Amino acid sequence: MSEIVSVSGGPTKPEIIAVSLSKLGLKDGDRFADVGCGTGSVSIEATRIARNLTIYAIDARKEALIATETNFKNFRIENARILAGEASDLLGSGGSIDSIDCAFVGGTKNIDSILEKLVEKKARSIVVNAVRIETVVRTIEAMKRLGIFDEVVHVAVSRSAPIAGETMFKPENPVYIIVGKR
């Protein structure tokens, strides 16, 4: 079993990926955008849920793109395009992506523009992960303006850790999962 090569800020925790992907409602053959793909861990898990996905893994950070490429090779992910640059540009009308069925957004720079472009691409479901409350508010407001806001789920995960021969729990950063549906 391969392990995910990581970068700063990632990978997204497995529990968060599980809830996020359950909210997306992926189907076999979907065109899936992983915006702010980081390590590609969300895309890798998505391929375990739905077969024959076309994946567009997008990130502006060189180290993230290298990690994603390595992880896709290690996990034998096929039918994936790794795209370098700002998602709002790559998803725009001059970009090479015709349509998107579902999108996971882990990077929240230019969130308003990204959401607009995903709606233009006819995405039926969009999930945004955020840790900053200001980002949550901006995302909800943008989704409401676009008529796609569905819900927000606040997820807090704690992991067991040894202490004095016994077990305690250490909290991870809580994550807000903001869901948009058409």
Image: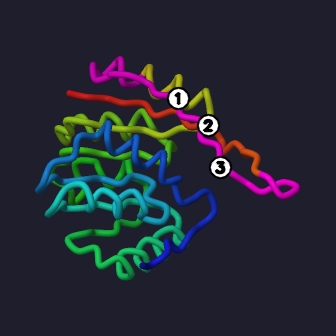
Quadrant assignment for the N terminus: bottom left
Residue 64 in the image, given as x and y percentages of width and height? 51, 68
In the displayed structure, would residue 33 be above or below residue 41? above
Region rendered in magenta: 142-166
Residues 138 and 20: in front is 20
Residues 162 and 101: in front is 162
Q: Secondary structure at mark 3?
A: strand
Q: Which residue is drawn at the image coordinates 53% and 38% (left, top)?
A: 130
Circle 1: residue type: His
**Residue at numbered disc 2:** 174
**For residue 130: magenta?**
no
Q: Which residue is drawn at the image coordinates 34% and 18% (left, top)?
A: 145
Circle 2: residue type: Pro
Q: Whole-Å distance between the Cαs marked 1 and 2?
A: 7 Å
**Residue at numbered disc 3:** 159
Quadrant assignment for the C terminus: top left
**Residue at numbered disc 1:** 154
Q: Which of marks 3 and 2 precedes in the sequence?
A: 3
